[in-house]
Each structure stands twice: as structure tokens, then as C-alpha cells.
Image (cartoon, rainbow, N blue to C red):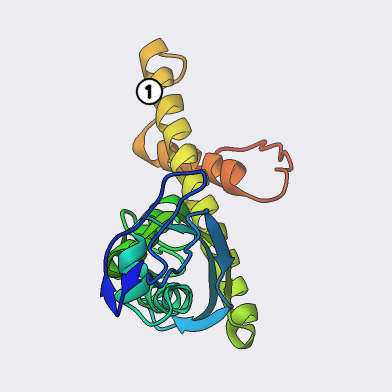
Amino acid sequence: MQLFGHYVGTERSPGLRWANPLYAKRFVSLRTRNFETSQLKVNDLDGNPIEFAAIVVWNVVDTAEACFQVDSYENYVKVQSESALRNLAAAYPYDAHQDGVKSLRANMAEVAAHLREEIQDRLAVAGVEVKEARISHLAYAPEIAAAMLQRQQASAIVAARTRIVDGAVGMVEMALERLDQKGTVHLDEERKAAMVSNLLVVLCGERAAQPVLNTGTMYH
């Protein structure tokens, strides 16, 4: 409520209320609202173009600041949310190719929490509280989507191969150690190398191994 342009107070109590007829009154809703930003085309930390969108849940907590500090608090929420979204996208890579690096795709909960904090910092001046902010759309831009899909597939293949090799090496070490402990056979270094080679081929190969009957020895 205002009297000749001067703020005189806010009435939040429910029920029927009377006010000075000279007061200019403006009604502001305190209900929780949400909106989805448009799909923004931005660059991530690595410079890759991505499509990014978010849903922001907010409500007015200070009606005086919402009315007097900004021209239109609803438009202010929209513009500042999209600005924070652009800034956030540039702080993270879409995919992390190194351990310990947070990314937009793999750490969505942490990214959403960061987004909420950044939007709240921008909207505090307008008396608005951000209750939740979450990512609703995240994808590579169409012009690089195919290339990035191949990169993801290659990364997955390399990671799978690395795990297979690690497991195979552990199994070979265990086999040699048990043979030595039980004294089943005594292998010199050359035979151990041949055994290791054969076991790695069997364990790491994509196709089933075909048995070969060896009727001679490696020395004759």
C-alpha cells in the first residue's frame, strides 16, 4: 500500500480488511510458481555447443522489494534465470573425460544445486525465493551430435577394454602364483611368458578360443 507515492506497509493477514481510501493498493501473489526456460544454445567449458534448458520453481517472499526494486519481477525472474543458465553451462564440460572432474551429464544433482544458488543470488534483490532449479533438457547441438556420439562410444570401448585387461592380468598372476605354490609344474621364464601370452589372448579376445593340440615342445 502507498500513500501519495510513499510506501506505508503490506497486509498479509487473511480475511476482510479495511484500508485508507487514499491508499493505492497493489495485490501480489505469494503462490509458488514455476516456468521452463527456453532451450538455449550455449558453449560448455570445452567450447562444445550444447542445448540447455531448466525448470525454476519460485515464489515472492518480500512483496515490497518485488514491487519497488525491479520494474517487473516476473520478467526479471525469467531474464536472470536464463542468464544464470548460460553462465552455469560455461562452468562445466558436457562430459568429463578425466576422473574427479564434474560434468553436466554425470553430476546433474550438483549442477542443479549450483544453478539454484546462482539464480537465488540474482533474484534476492527482487524479494524472490528460488525453491528448486533442475535441468529439463541437455543435449549436444545437432551439428556435432553425431561426432560426439562416436566419441562417447569410443570412450566406453576404451574403458571396457581397460577393465578387461586389468582383470585378465590379475587372473594370470593368480594362476602363476598358485602353480608355484602347489608345485604342479615348474616353468622357466620362457614357458611362463608363453603361458601369459596364451592366457591373455584367451581372456581378452572377443571370440571364443579354439583349442590347439600341441604334440611337440617349444624347444624342438
Where in the figure is residue 203, as x and y percent of width and height? 58, 41
Residue 91 shows in this picture: no
Where in the figure is residue 153, as x and y percent of width and height? 60, 65
- Quadrant in the picture for the N terminus: bottom left
Left or right: 39 as drawn, with respect to 88: right
Where in the figure is residue 216, as x and y percent of width and height? 62, 38
Residue 170 shows in this picture: yes
Q: Residue at x 49, y 39 (%)?
A: 168
Q: Nearer the viewer, residue 1 or 205?
A: 1
Above or below 25: residue 15: above
Q: Residue at x 52, y 53 (%)?
A: 32
- Specify the amino acid type for callout 1: Glu
Residue extending farthest front: 21
Where in the figure is residue 29, as x and y percent of width and height? 50, 59
Badge 1 crowding class, 10 Å Cα cut-off, few under 14, some 14 to 19, many 20 or more, is: few
Q: Secondary structure at mark 1?
A: helix
Q: Residue at x 54, y 39 (%)?
A: 199
Residue extending farthest bottom: 143
Q: Nearer the viewer, residue 196 or 115?
A: 115
Residue, disc 1? 177
Above or below 125: residue 41: below
Q: Nearer the viewer, residue 134 or 71?
A: 71
Residue extending farthest top: 182
Residue 156 location, quadrant:
bottom right
Q: Residue at x 72, y 38 (%)?
A: 211
How many numbered badges does the structure rendering display? 1
Q: Nearer the viewer, residue 217 or 127?
A: 127
Residue 212 location, quadrant:
top right
Left or right: 28 as drawn, with respect to 188: right
